[in-house]
Amino acid sequence: EPLGVVAGIGAWNYPIQIALWKSAPALAAGNAMIFKPSETTPLTALKLAEIYTEAGLPDGVFNVVQGAGREIGQWLTEHPVIEKISFTGGVETGK
């Protein structure tokens, strides 16, 4: 059963793979996703969003947010609509 809105936070290494590993299962399960890529590799997630749109995914189902990791991470973890978060990164950042 879909959860609703989920979030993914990616890392700088393997940026397109991480975005796909997080988004494909979430979208296949019927969820909408907000994805925050690494500040080092921001364009890969935007390209993935274009690919999803070209494939027919409706607007608003896969969303990319950019910005400082600490600020966006806090916003994602505290947002009341987000049901689950998948994070790739260091232990200290995850805390």
Image (spheres, rainbow, N blue to C red):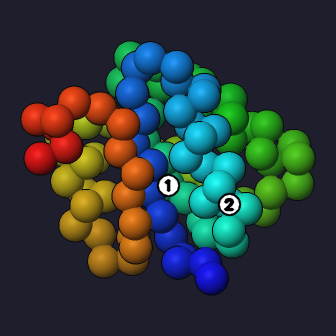
Which residue does the numbered mark 1 point to in the structure image?
A: 34
Which residue shows up at 31% across the image and 77% down it? 80
Is residue 68 shown above or below 59?
Answer: above
Which element is circle 1 on?
strand
Which residue shows up at 12% across the image and 47% down it? 95
Sequence-wise, the earlier of marks 2 and 1 is 2
Is residue 81 shown above or below 28?
Answer: below
Which residue shows up at 68% across the image and 68% down it? 29
Q: Quadrant of residue 30?
A: bottom right
Distance Cα–Cα, label 2 vs label 1: 11 Å
Is residue 18 shown above or below 49?
Answer: above
Q: Nearer the viewer, residue 56 or 94?
A: 94
Q: Which mark is residue 51?
A: none
Q: Decide if residue 68 is in sight here.
A: no
Residue type at mark 1 is Ile
Q: Quadrant of residue 16?
A: top right
Which class describes the residues within 10 Å of circle 2: few (<14), some (14-19), or many (20+)?
some
Where residue 37 sits: x, y (%)? Answer: 44, 33
Judge from the rendering whether residue 60 lies leftward or rightward of residue 64; answer left or right.
Answer: right
Where residue 36 sits: x, y (%)? Answer: 42, 42
Which element is circle 2 on?
helix
Q: Quadrant of residue 84?
A: bottom left
Where residue 41 sits: x, y (%)? Answer: 46, 19
Q: Which mark is residue 27?
A: 2
Is residue 67 shown above or below 76?
Answer: above
